[in-house]
Amino acid sequence: MTKLMEYLRVALRNLRANKGRSLLTMLGIIIGISSVIMIISAGGGAKSTINDSLDSMFSGMVYFYVDDVEAAGFDTFSEEDVDLVNDHKGEYLSGATYDYSTSCSVRTIRGRFDATVHGENAVGEFISTNPIIKGRYFNDAECASAANVCVLSENTAKKMFGTIDVIGKNFEATINDTSVELTVIGIRKDPKSAGAMSSLIGDDSSMKLEMPYSYISRNCGIGDYKGKYLLIIADKDHTYEAAKSVKKLLEEKHGVTDTKAIATENWTDYAEQYDAIFSTVTLLVTVVAGIALLVGGIGVMNIMLVSVTERTREIGIRKSLGARTRAILMQFIAEASMITLIGGVIGIIFGLLLASLVCVALGTTPAISAGSVLIATIFSCGIGLFFGIYPARKAAKLNPIEALRHE
């Protein structure tokens, strides 16, 4: 232990004697380590935010549509189909609804705004995992009577009224060129995502209204149009089971059991694809950053070779005075390790700072793990050992007589 401390003291003394050169050598390690830490932390944070946002917006959603109209004999699902699914609601299945959406404009005392309106039935409450934080969602009775009620997102309420305390307030909306008056009965919590990441995943915090589809159908000039899709909401861990049972119900009802007339789109599949793509991109960028770290290691080897050349006479004197080959070897390995260790620590600090800055810009939280920091530290020291061995062995094997003759 005493010898090790002596090696480290000598290594630090030599680094201080060549501050500029040592700093430039560390720079490659600093850039490599900080890049790896930044990518892992910022990438993990962005991935987590995307997964949470997709989960809050699309969790448990399965769309049904007619893929073969000729075989099915119909092109859209009817209210009877929706009722059939809702009659079979169970532990995993919340129910079915249309998800008709269109653009609209709304007017309040704060001005006129563009918004998106979603027409659904009472099952629409479960489309998003973002809860109703004020008031309530519209119920079956209000859907049956085509009540002129609506639920707003937090962001929408704040833009329209300046506050989310708006339960019972009325406002004017123009839907499909039809002017109507709506009453706010509930406020839904906004998704977790924010900033640049929101736009990346398609959640740009635009104004959103949810209201009974029946009201839009009867009062806003769309008649019986229900759109292409029938949407079911199920427990996110059992969407495949729910989709299979609902598909069987619909196929039996329409007599298309032996065909592929009815198809599905499961958002769980899309979420898994997004996750795999993001993981692959993060891995590729991390590999590129690792190459920068490798280049930094080569820089360490280069500077250690220069150091061996400069200190050839010193090595000869030490070996003439009885210094063992092992001692010379350990001395130069200690110096290489010290360069990479200090560079690695600085790189970790810079990496964490950069990850925080990137995440602030994206509106996410960095996923900093002790494991990634530990791996980066070990990898940094490993680089020093690996690229320091050759110069150290070269120094240790110098013939003392030849070394003393060196000018």
Image (cartoon, rainbow, N blue to C red):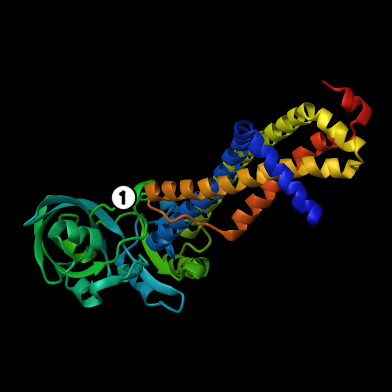
Left or right: where 204 falls relative to 340: left
Q: Please give the name of the residue rendered at 81% of the width and 45% of the height, measured from the top-left corner.
A: 330
| Residue 97, picture quadrant | bottom left
Which quarter of the rendered picture does the N terminus lie within?
A: bottom right
Q: Is residue 391 above or below residue 245?
A: above
Left or right: where 126 falls relative to 5: left
Q: Nearer the viewer, residue 24 or 351?
A: 24
| Residue 298, picture quadrant | top right
Which amino acid type is marked by label 1? Asp
Where's residue 338, x and y in %? 69, 45
Q: Nearer the viewer, residue 145 or 349?
A: 349
Where's residue 256, x and y in %? 47, 62
Q: Nearer the viewer, residue 18 or 75?
A: 18
Q: Is residue 90 above or below residue 280?
A: below
Q: Is residue 381 above or below residue 253?
A: above
Label 1 neighbour load within 10 Å: few <14, some 14-19, many 20+: some
Taking the image as drawn, is residue 100 in sight?
yes
Secondary structure under tag 1 reads loop
Where's residue 124, x and y in %? 31, 67
> Number of labelled discs?
1
Where's residue 56, x and y in %? 39, 63
Q: Is residue 367 above or below residue 283?
A: below
Q: Please give the name of the residue rendered at 34% of the width and 54% of the height, measured from the top-left corner.
A: 194
Q: Please give the name of the residue rendered at 67% of the width and 38% of the height, measured from the top-left corner.
A: 15
Report the residue marked by disc 1: 204
